[in-house]
Image (cartoon, grey):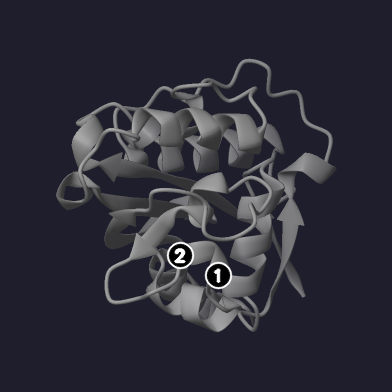
Amino acid sequence: MKELLVATKNPGKFKEICEALEGAGFEPVFLGGVEVDDRDFVEDGEGFEDNAKKKARYYYESFGGRFEFVLGEDSGIMVDALDGELGVKTRRWGAGEKASDEGWVEYFLKRMDMVAEKDRGAEFICVACLLCHGEEHLFRGETKGVITQSLEAPIKPGIPLSSCFKPLGFDKVYAALSIEEKNRISHRGKALMGLKEFLRTQAD
């Protein structure tokens, strides 16, 4: 089975990606489990697409051809009441990327304390860039929803917002959905659905 390097060191994201790509005919490889000197990598793109492309290209070149297929993914949330504050900076925003999941989401919910229910709209966005034999293939997914007043499900490692983001049309937050439900309607699930179909054409 061919290997797919998933360019993330976030175990929560890696787990979701593995679940979404099950049956694609590839063996996902966790970046956090392989040795690479990436101290010079800076995630400074202006948008999700820029960052996804940059990750895929950087790690494709870093391994010198060891991996023919490299997936760079960037995602984040746009919150109506925090206009422009999060987006590509989502995990670095607020309490910062070195904060624990609990500390990060606690800060976030405190910022949202005084926001009226009608203004708690938000949208998750994901862009996945597959570098395949040096060529880029882009896949995008978006999901609208609302920020809940408090956590409505236990925090999943690496993806704390899943416990306080309720997609439109559902009465449960992301983290309370089944794997099948989330892969069908989540921003990441939508982006990876297209990627999965493409990978199937490359698996043989």
User: Which residue corresponds to the image point at 65% horizontal and 54% vertical from the top-left?
Assistant: 156
Q: Residue furthest top?
A: 40
How far is the residue under mark 2 from the one under mark 1? 5 Å
The answer to whether 185 appears left or right of 96 in the picture is left
- The kind of secondary structure element at disc 1 is helix
**Labelled disc at residue 48:** none
Instruction: Check whether the beta carbons of the residues at disc 2 and disc 1 lie within 8 A of each other.
Output: yes
> Quadrant location of residue 4?
bottom right
In depth, the one of 5 and 192 nearer the eye is 192
Q: Position of residue 193 (x, y in %)?
A: 44, 75
| Crowd band around label 1 with a 10 angstrom C-alpha radius: few (<14), some (14–19), many (20+) | some
Seen from the viewer's position, the closer of residues 176 and 110 is: 110
Q: Using the rendered image of the protein, determine whether residue 198 is visible from the camera's viewpoint.
A: no
* Residue under the image location 55 percent in, 31 percent down: 104
> Please, is residue 122 above or below residue 144 in the view?
above
The image position of residue 48, as x and y in percent, is 35, 41
Where 77 sits versus 133, above or below? above
Query: In this figure, which residue is indicated by the disc labeled 2?
Result: 173
Q: Is residue 159 left or right of residue 45?
A: right
Observer-nearest of 194 and 12:
12
Q: Which amino acid type corresponds to the residue marked 2 in the rendered image?
A: Val
Q: Is residue 154 visible?
A: yes
Q: Which mark is residue 176?
A: 1
Q: Quadrant of residue 16?
A: bottom right
Return the x and y of residue 103 as percentages of the image width and height: 61, 29
For the point 20% across and 43% down, which residue is it?
Answer: 116
Rate crowding at label 2 as few (under 14), some (14 to 19) or many (20 or more) other CA atoms within 10 Å: many
Q: Please state which of residues 43 and 96 is positioned toward the viewer in this rendering.
A: 96
Image quarter hosting the C terminus: bottom right
Residue at position x 54%, y 82% in the image: 180
